[in-house]
Image (cartoon, rainbow, N blue to C red):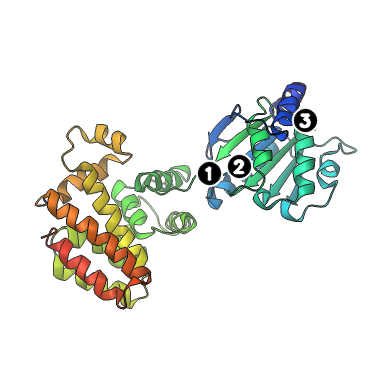
């Protein structure tokens, strides 16, 4: 069995891993000697460390590992531990061989808040991991448990790390949404994906839920019209619609969309963030030359974003961009409490942007 073999072969090199762990525990500086994988390319190992702030991706990574193990052996025994409520001896008890020697999957949450007992016992476990056992550790961030993280990252042959970084770039969120439809074997147009990504700019879980709703409730190819039909109110008044209208010079339309968004409960802070994201992309590409694919790679964008920013830049001067960037900083402070009337600050920003910074 592949998973069992992986655990056994890794355990056979545990003496080296153990000496590394002990060295780190004594205060030595650890190197990242283990394999680091993205959330969507996971595999089992005796110890799997899942790091990063994105809970949706972390949960999916852990479930994917469990599914892989259960497919190899349906008798898989699954256990859950909370590192912040850990009682001494729990890990050893769960990892001990059972009567029928079923493989074991132990999922540990809250490692960033772990107790001293868990920290000590997990360091010991890393020296000698149990056969046919996969321990998945979820660490969401922070300095608590750093000694353990360093030890795991130095334990080559025993551990791997799954990195679940927050998807902040539009290009990353676009790729995520496209993968949702691809995995469901649904045909979707690029414009539809751009529409849903623009409509759901907050929590990744919200974007994922929107994609799943379209997959479940619609038939045939998912197009821009499909997205408009399901999320018309949201798409029509989201922050990027306001920003697009203002950047295109349509002052009246942009102000109308802005007032409608605010009247229906939109938070001013994400509205400013949407303007900032668009203007930052324009500033990056101002004066840049080359094919869209090359510029996309250079600036961490999708090719369609490069094309869009180039269109948006028509009629803008460097001085106009500089003025708007300064005004964005002032407006950001205003909507976060520095001004008495944040809505007036937003309307002023829309007016200046619609005039291309003049």
Quarter-of-image position of residue 85: bottom right
Image location (x, y in percent) of residue 42: 58, 36
Q: Residue at x 72, y 54 (%)?
A: 84
Give the percent coordinates (x, y) of residue 2.
69, 26
Q: Which residue is mark 1?
A: 164
* Residue positioned most to the right: 99
Which structural element holds mark 3?
helix
Q: Nearer the viewer, mark 3 or mark 1?
A: 3
What secondary structure is found at the residue carrying circle 1? loop
Whether 101 is drawn above or below 271: the answer is above
Q: Looking at the rendering, which quadrant does residue 290 occupy?
A: top left
Mark seen at residue 50: 2
Q: Residue at x 75, y 27 (%)?
A: 18
Give percent across and percent down for residue 190: 31, 46
Residue 207 x/y as whole percent = 44, 56
For mark 3, what is the residue? 127
Q: Mark 1 packing: few (<14 Cα in 10 Å), some, or many (20+)?
A: many
């Amino acid at each position: 069995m592949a998973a069992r073999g992986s655990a056994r072969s890794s355990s056979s090199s545990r003496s080296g891993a153990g000496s590394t762990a002990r060295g780190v525990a004594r205060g030595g500086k650890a190197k990242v000697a283990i394999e680091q994988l993205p959330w969507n390319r996971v595999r089992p190992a005796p110890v799997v460390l899942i790091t990063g702030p994105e809970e949706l991706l972390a949960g999916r990574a852990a479930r994917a590992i469990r599914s892989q193990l259960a497919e190899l052996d349906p008798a898989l025994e699954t256990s859950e531990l909370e590192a912040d409520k850990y009682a001494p001896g729990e890990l050893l008890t769960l990892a001990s061989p059972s009567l029928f020697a079923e493989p074991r999957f132990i999922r540990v949450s809250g490692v960033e808040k772990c107790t001293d007992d868990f920290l000590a016992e997990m360091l010991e476990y890393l020296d000698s991991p149990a056969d046919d056992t996969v321990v998945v550790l979820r660490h969401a961030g922070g300095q608590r448990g750093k000694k353990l993280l360093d030890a795991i990252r130095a334990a080559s042959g025993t551990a791997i790390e799954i990195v679940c970084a927050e998807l902040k770039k539009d290009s990353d969120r676009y790729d995520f949404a496209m993968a949702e439809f691809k995995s469901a074997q649904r045909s979707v147009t690029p414009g539809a994906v751009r529409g849903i990504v623009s409509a759901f700019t907050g929590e990744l879980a919200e974007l994922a839920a929107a994609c799943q709703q379209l997959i479940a409730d619609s038939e045939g190819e998912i197009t821009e019209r499909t997205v408009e039909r399901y999320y018309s109110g949201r798409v029509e008044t989201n922050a990027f619609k306001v920003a697009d209208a203002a950047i295109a010079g349509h002052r009246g339309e942009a102000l109308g969309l802005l007032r409608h968004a605010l009247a229906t409960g939109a938070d001013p802070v994400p509205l400013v963030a949407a303007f900032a994201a668009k203007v930052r992309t324009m500033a990056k590409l101002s004066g840049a030359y080359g094919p869209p694919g090359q510029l996309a790679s250079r600036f961490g964008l999708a090719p369609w974003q490069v094309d869009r920013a180039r269109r948006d830049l028509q009629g803008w001067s460097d001085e106009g961009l500089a003025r708007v960037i300064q005004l964005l900083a002032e407006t950001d402070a205003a909507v976060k409490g520095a001004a008495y009337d944040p809505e007036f600050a937003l309307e002023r920003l829309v007016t200046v942007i619609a005039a291309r910074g003049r």
